Amino acid sequence: MEKNVNQDILLNMRKSIELYYDFIIEEFPLEKRFIYDKEKFKRLFGTNQEFDNLDDLFWFIVDNHVHKDDLEKVDVFRDIDVDRRVSRNEYCIETEFRIRLKRGTYLWISAVTVLLYDDERRNYYVLMLLKDINKKKMLELESTILARRDAMTRLYNKTYAENVVKEEIEKLEKDANAALVIIDIDNFKTINDTYGHMIGDHVIIEFASRLMTCTRETDIVGRIGGDEFLVYIPNFGNRERLYHKITKMLENLHYEYSEKDTELQVHCSMGISTFSDENNDYMKMFQCADKALYVSKKNGKDAFCIYE
């Protein structure tokens, strides 16, 4: 490679890159040349401030516009030391993060830094490329959400609900309080057999909607079977508050379903277990809640039982 970076090659490369990337920053450190589109930068970040080098520009973006949850992702750019990068064969550095635009919205971007240098490592060229990948990220997010959700009710599905509850229970301190509630719609098979599966589906959907209104944002709610639901309640306070919460939940989930010529009473049974020294993982809590659910059913349904 020639000692001076070939300008014709760079010009052709730049034209090709502009077809794919939205914002291009170039720096020739030894020549003290720094190139970027100042007007586009102003439109994106709402500032007239100008910069003389890549470090100042990039860390201005980081300090003022990068989402706080993504700050670790930009640390990879913190020290673009050419000799160190070359010794490690690190010619390209890339990551993805969110930036806040002047309109107050966040945009996902891909950032790539490419290092070009001569054989003697005396003259080099730094190219940083930014690309709007917001649509791609939104599609990924939507796919992730769909993978976690039950298609009918939009509650968490069985796999995700169980996994996230397991993780939450594993984090609990010895003296923490948390409850696991298993809920079963009473006589649901009779509803399906009598009124058909379409009505049965509508009952499930409305029941799930009502269940969500009975829970807090910190609670984890999932559908774990046809007519079976799970609610994980962290930090419920004392036993009296838990009893009050479950009582109100049971009342709200006892209602009359009405559609055209169909009217029926919907209610449920609940089994509850609480976290303790002995009852200290998901499987143990689930088994205890399931035993309590059986007691609720046996005692006439439309009731709850807390495992002792």
Image (cartoon, grey):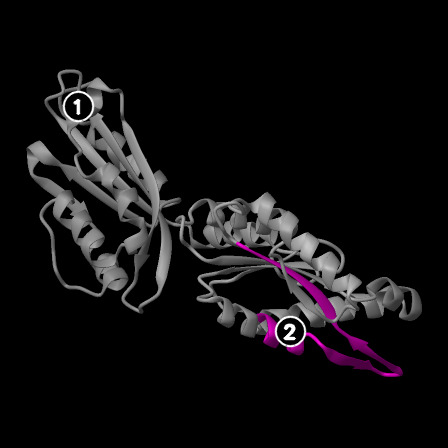
In-front residue for pair 45/2: 45
Asked if residue 26 is among those painted magenta in the image, a careful observer would answer no
Residue 84's disc is 1
Label 1: how many Cα within 10 Å (few below 14, some 14–19, many 20+): few
**Left or right, residue 74 beside residue 107:** left
Give how far across and how far down residue 168 sits, in percent: 47, 50
Specify the quadrant of the image occupied by residue 189: bottom right
Residue 210's disc is 2
**Left or right, residue 196 beside residue 186:** right
Specify the quadrant of the image occupied by residue 106: bottom left
In-front residue for pair 267/127: 267
**Disc number lying in front (1 or 2):** 2
Specify the quadrant of the image occupied by residue 235: bottom left
Cα–Cα span, label 1 and label 2: 59 Å
Identify which amino acid the numbered label 1 is placed on.
Arg
| Secondary structure found at label 2 | helix
Label 2: how many Cα within 10 Å (few below 14, some 14–19, many 20+): some
Q: Residue at x 27, y 44 (%)?
A: 72
Residue numbers of the magenta segment = 246-274
Q: Would residue 224 be visible to someone looking at this image?
A: no
In which quadrant will I find the N terminus?
top left
Q: How many marks?
A: 2
Give how far across and how far down residue 15 sits, in percent: 32, 41
**Left or right, residue 231 beside residue 128:** right
Identify which amino acid the numbered label 2 is placed on.
Arg
Give how far across and how far down residue 178 sits, in percent: 49, 57
